[in-house]
Amino acid sequence: FLTKSRFCAPWGMTWGTDGNIYFVDGAEFVVDELASTQLSSKYAGTQWAAGTTPTPADGANASAVFYAPQWIAADPKNGNLYTIGMECAVRMITSTTVSTLAGTASNGLGTCPASGNLNAGYDVDGQGSAAVIPYRNAKGIVVDSVGDVIIAENQTIRVIDASGNVVTLAGECDAANACGAMAGIGPVDGPGSSARFGDIITIAIDSDDVIYIMDHDTL
């Protein structure tokens, strides 16, 4: 790869189905593309100066706005990209357009709808904008072989289908259960909502769609 590109605050990255690398810049609020034959180029998002707080907006790749994206994953079926970060939503990026798959995109200056406080909000499953993805809880994102998006938060693993329906797969983080980093409620093995996590750090998925997470409390 060429070595003259400069970045501000690169976070997560993923291999695209086209063989290129895509990564998010959490300070300039863009998705960059890196091919073996060129310097990195902006793939989606409007570049902002570090320290600003733009309001997220869907639209054409060149004009869409992100706020502090942190993690990114590619759909192995169609090459679409998905991001999650500090904007209370999962965003989908096609070759031309950025849209919100689930949650309500926010710049984090206020709480996400019905999500509790900024640092330890709680999950609400649902369709599209009815779902709540708490601010600062995102810990990673992957896509399985059928195109479902799986997100890791501090204490939960959640699945989002192509229509934006969000369902909690494992763990629990709601108004009745303490959430947020180091909430001290796990780890506990068990099925579905009976499982508990201490503080998820990251997530991965293999070719058989088996999901793996790293939990701070079980290192």
Image (spheres, rainbow, N blue to C red):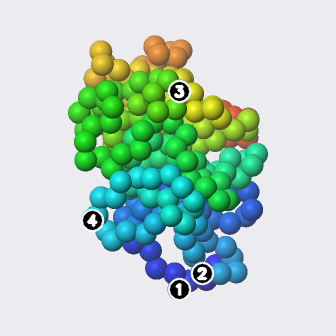
Q: Nearer the viewer, residue 210 or 64?
A: 64
The residue beneath circle 2 is 39
Camera-side mark, 2 or 3: 3
- How would you rate the neighbour count of disc 2 (Cα within 10 Å): few for under 14, some for 14-19, many for 20 or more? some
Which residue occupies 33% across, 50% down?
107
Q: Secondary structure at mark 3?
A: strand
Which residue occupies 53% across, 27% down?
127
Gap between marks 2 and 3 measured at Cα: 39 Å
- How would you rate the neighbour count of disc 1 (Cα within 10 Å): few for under 14, some for 14-19, many for 20 or more? few
Position of 88 relative to 127 (above/below) = below
Q: State if disc 2 and disc 1 touch (CB < 8 Å).
A: yes
The residue beneath circle 1 is 4
Position of 78 relative to 206 (above/below) = below
Gap between marks 3 and 1 measured at Cα: 43 Å
Q: Earlier in the sequence, mark 2 or mark 3?
A: 2
The residue beneath circle 3 is 127
